[in-house]
Image: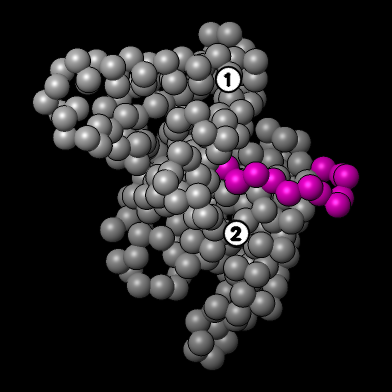
Amino acid sequence: MAEMTEEIIVGYDGSPGSELALHWAAREASDRGITLTVCHAWAPEDLALLIDPPLIDVARRHSEEIAERGVQHAEPFAGPGGVQPLQAAGSPARVLCEHSGPSTLVVVGSRGHGRLAGLLLGSVAWQLAGHAQGRIVIVREPVRRANGGPCPVVAGLDGSPASDAALLFAAEEAALRHVPVLAVCALADSPTSLGGARQAEEDFSSLLTRWEKEHPGVTVLRQVSQGSPRTALLEAGAEAQMIIVGSRGRGGVPSMTLGSVAAALLHYAPCPVGMIRQAATAA
């Protein structure tokens, strides 16, 4: 079972995507009553920086300025004293992965100051989703909602070992927002053996029945779809505050670090995407 979130770290580089992630993470830290760490990682790309100490000092000071700016931007949401800076030398993806863990929530925007403006997902977000451990949120800008009512937190469940952890994460996020969890099970990618779809639906129902008995204070709505998980979750996300899934489901190649459903959500979801990565499922 996944642990509760005790620490939040957000990757920040001053880009519009990282500002969006910063504000999301600051509110999350405030709601949870924990400290937010604003991380800016700097990686010298010019070999001269590695051998010229004055240039390294300039880069380090620039990193400190960016991290402090992030702290200032986060404080109106998290409150004074609830935010701290972190500067680290190295690639942003590596630094954030090194700070990830079972009780840590790592937050980044879907794109930062990358060089390819047309990308739907930046390399840092992609590497983090594929290699970090614990809880991860990729903040994608939410679309305008047609429904003015309280939007649920969607949990994609397929009966894989990550389903319990994804449901716990979703329940925590829903409780913070005082909204229900919408648990979605899609049957199109169920095992092709006889009765595979029926078994998947029974496993889904059993998981939620057990969950409701153990967590009577959590409202869980159920949705079973005959379509693909990608389609079902993207459609549910149109009226959701966020979508939460495991990094890999039942299908795919065991050595894969990221499943096809999770990858599709990272590229196209109309809201922030939460993901659970556990050591047992990492390659």
Counting other residues with Cα less than 10 Å from the Cα at mark 2, is it few (<14), some (14-19), or many (20 or more)?
some
Please give left or right for residue 282 compared with residue 11 in the image.
left
Please give left or right for residue 150 compared with residue 207 in the image.
right
The answer to whether any part of residue 181 appears in the image is no
Q: Main secondary structure of the magenta part?
A: loop
User: How far across and how far down the image is residue 229, in percent?
Assistant: 60, 69
| Residue ID at (28%, 58%) | 283
Residues 160 and 146: in front is 146
Q: Which mark is residue 74?
A: 1
| Quarter of the figure with residue 25 | top right
Counting other residues with Cα less than 10 Å from the Cα at mark 1, is it few (<14), some (14-19), or many (20 or more)?
many
Q: Which residues are magenta?
A: 139-150
User: How far across and how far down the image is residue 251, in percent?
Assistant: 44, 73
From the viewer's perspective, is residue 192 above or below residue 232?
Answer: below
User: How far across and how far down the image is residue 176, in percent?
Assistant: 68, 33
Secondary structure of the residue carrying numbered label 1: helix
| Residue ID at (29%, 21%) | 59
User: How far across and how far down the image is residue 199, in percent?
Assistant: 57, 78
| Residue ID at (43%, 20%) | 67
The residue at the far bottom in this view is: 194
Q: Is residue 146 magenta?
A: yes
| Quarter of the figure with residue 124 | top left
Q: Amino acid at mark 1?
A: Ala
The residue under label 2 is 268
| Residue ID at (45%, 39%) | 113
Secondary structure of the residue carrying numbered label 2: helix
